[in-house]
Structure formats: structure tokens, C-alpha cells
């Protein structure tokens, strides 16, 4: 199968600022525009290379601050790399923060149409998939109610259902397979397996190491923004567990920027 994702020598640099940096023009003017510059910089990701063929799933493991979410943003085109390159072939979908972009005062039906159009579908295409989305989310009785009365689980199920009905050729997943109860989680996993069987290339970030072993064809381990290990999921996960077990948690470098 051809490579759907190609990552070569990828790097992203971030900058830290002093806690007393002026945050308004007025404050900066009073200080004579001193203290505006960055205190120092660090690499959120550096010298990372890998390939994901169509119909294959890559698992990404690593502690918080390892660069996993930075990698997803670069793959998704949200951030621009400072070094290296990313090539993604095919229509992309992302299961990151499910339900993000929903408006709580709009109904479930309205949110489905808005979200579908934002993802690049026409209203006719959303209409064609609407019943399947609602049935998958299991919110038929509430679809015309405002989202503010939905439980968190209902909102997440609806967001997940919208995302997986976009028919992506490349799919990025970040810790969202714990949506809903056990039966709904299994339904989500089954749908993702269907995508894979149909030729979709998938990148899965998860702290559920058993899930990485079970679902992925290959895995990589990121630590401090660098690629530490790459290979069969069982071997990478075993190495990750052996070398990090009992190690103290690393400090967050930049909040969500390097999660």
C-alpha cells in the first residue's frame, strides 16, 4: 500500500516568556517595551521521521509533555514545522476533542449540520448521513433539544458520531476512545477497524497501552520531543513500560502545547 503519511526530520520549536511579561500595549509602553522578548526556547518535537501506509495504524506512546499533541497538530496542518516536512495524502479527519465547536444553545440537529459543513460536507451530504449519525450517537430522543440539556456523555457521543461519518482517508485520534460506556466504546473501536480495513491510514495517541498493542500495526515512543523507539507495538510498549516504570513525572514544558 502507498504511504498516506510521510514525516521526515520533523521539528517544532516553542518559546517561553517570563511570568511578568507585559500583556497589554499600555503596560509595555510604561515599561519602555522592555521584557517583551522570549526568555528561552525549547524543541517540542525534533528530528522525528516515520511513514504510515494506507490501511495501517500507527500508535504513539509517551508521557505528558513528550510531544504527542504537537505531532498531531503538525500532521493536521494546525501548526507549521520549523524543520523537516509532513506529507499527507487523502481527505483527513480528526477525533481530538469530540464535541469541540458545538454550541450549547443550538439543538443537536443544528449542531450536526453546522459541524458537518465545517468539516467540508455540503448540507445535502449531511442530510444523507444525518439518520446514521443520530443512530450511532444513540440520541434520537434528544436530537431536537438544545445541547445545554445533554449530559457530557451524550455530547461526546454526538461529536464522535459526526466525526466518524466524514469518511476520512487519513484519521488522527487523540485519547477519545473512552467515550461513553463499554458497549459504545466497543462500537467506536469497531468503526475505526472498518476505516482501517477500507484503506484509511490512522494515527492513534493513547495512554491505554493495551489498546495500542491490540489495534496498531506499528508504534513509536516519543520522549522529550524525540523519537526514542519505533517498531512492533508489543516491543515498543514493553520498552516504554520498562524504561519509564517508577520514573518521576516530567514537568510540563508548555501546557497543552507539548502534551
Image: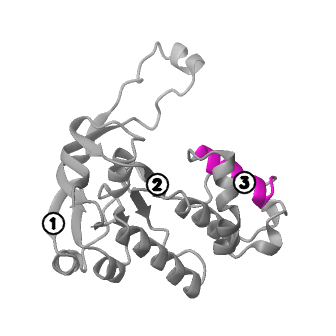
- Near-viewer residue (122 or 36): 122
Which residue carries the number 2 mark?
A: 93
User: Vertical placement of 33 versus 58: above or below?
Assistant: above
Q: Secondary structure at mark 1?
A: strand
The residue indicated by pointer 1 is: 230
Name the quadrant of the N terminus: bottom left
Residue lying farthest to the right in this orientation:
145
The residue tagged with tag 2: helix, strand or loop? strand
Closer to the camera: disc 3 or disc 1? 3
The front one of 204 and 54 is: 54
Location of the C terminus (image quadrant) = bottom left
Q: Which residue is labeled 3 in the image?
A: 111
Between disc 3 and disc 1, whose residue precedes? 3
Residues rendered magenta in the picture: 106-118
Residue appearing at x 27%, y 43% in the figure? 87
Residue 11 lies in what quarter of the image?
A: top left
Amino acid at each position: 500500500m502507498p504511504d498516506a503519511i510521510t514525516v521526515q526530520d520533523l521539528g517544532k520549536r516553542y518559546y517561553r516568556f517570563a511570568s511578568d511579561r507585559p500583556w497589554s500595549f499600555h503596560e509595555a509602553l510604561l515599561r519602555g517595551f522592555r521584557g517583551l522578548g522570549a526568555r528561552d526556547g525549547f524543541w517540542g518535537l525534533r528530528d522525528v521521521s516515520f511513514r504510515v501506509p494506507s490501511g495501517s495504524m500507527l500508535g504513539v506512546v509517551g508521557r505528558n509533555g513528550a510531544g504527542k499533541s504537537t505531532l498531531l497538530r503538525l500532521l493536521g496542518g494546525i501548526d507549521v514545522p520549523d524543520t523537516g516536512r509532513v506529507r499527507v495524502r487523502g481527505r483527513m479527519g480528526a477525533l481530538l476533542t469530540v464535541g469541540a465547536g458545538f454550541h450549547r444553545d443550538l439543538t443537536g440537529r443544528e449542531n450536526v449540520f453546522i459541524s458537518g459543513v465545517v468539516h467540508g460536507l455540503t448540507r445535502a451530504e449531511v442530510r444523507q448521513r444525518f439518520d446514521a449519525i443520530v443512530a450511532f450517537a444513540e440520541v434520537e430522543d434528544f436530537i431536537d433539544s438544545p445541547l445545554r440539556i445533554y449530559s457530557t456523555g451524550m455530547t461526546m457521543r454526538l461529536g464522535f458520531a459526526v466525526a466518524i461519518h466524514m469518511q476520512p482517508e487519513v484519521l488522527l485520534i487523540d485519547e477519545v476512545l473512552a467515550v461513553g460506556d463499554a458497549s459504545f466504546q466497543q462500537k467506536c473501536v469497531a468503526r475505526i477497524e472498518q476505516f482501517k480495513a477500507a484503506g484509511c491510514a490512522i494515527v492513534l495517541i493513547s495512554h491505554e497501552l493495551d489498546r495500542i498493542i491490540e489495534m496498531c500495526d506499528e508504534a513509536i515512543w516519543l520522549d522529550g520531543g524525540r523519537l526514542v523507539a519505533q517498531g512492533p507495538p508489543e516491543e515498543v510498549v514493553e520498552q516504554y513500560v520498562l524504561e519509564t516504570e517508577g520514573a518521576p513525572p516530567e514537568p510540563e514544558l508548555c501546557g497543552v502545547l507539548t502534551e
